[in-house]
Image: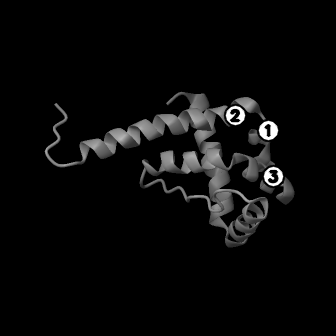
Amino acid sequence: MPAKLKQTLDSSVKIVNFIRGRALNHRLFQSFCDELGSDHNVLLYHTAVRWLSRGVVLNRFFSVHEEIKSFLRSCKSDLVIPLESLELIQMPAYISDIFLQINKLSTSIQSREIHIV
């Protein structure tokens, strides 16, 4: 993976794990999203064991990136800095599309009587 995409992926996972990994941040983010009337109020937790989970995590991250940005600003966190650039907002969308296609391919190969050749 190119360095720029890897850096974007790592920063997105770091932000998700900051919010989701601490119980207080997770509860505050849920109530924050409920107040805003967001479609999603829970971020999905990323685990390094299942690399296919990255696509789902990035998809959810991109769908609530405005709420995440507002939440991080209210927490006065330094993690909001990567979300300020338009380019760094577009990169998670690009990466989530790539992982979405990989996930579709992986699940289609796993069905019965499907041969890779």
Is residue 84 visible in this depiction of the protein? yes
Q: Residue drawn at (42%, 36%), measured in percent from left and top?
A: 101
Asked whether the residues under the numbered discs 1 and 2 touch, taking CB atoms below 8 Å apart as contact, a structural biologist would say: yes
Image quadrant in which you'd find residue 116: top left
Q: Secondary structure at mark 2?
A: helix
* Left or right of residue 19, residue 117 in this image: left
In space, the residues marked 2 and 3 are separated at their CA atoms by: 16 Å
Q: Residue drawn at (46%, 51%), measured in percent from left and top?
A: 53
Mark 2 = which residue? 88
How packed is label 2: few (under 14 Cα within 10 Å), some, or many (20 or more)?
some
Mark 1 = which residue? 84
Residue 70's disc is 3
Return the residue nearer the eye: 115 or 9: 115
How packed is label 1: few (under 14 Cα within 10 Å), some, or many (20 or more)?
few
Please state which amino acid type lies under the numbered disc 1: Glu
x and y percent of residue 109 in the render?
Answer: 25, 42
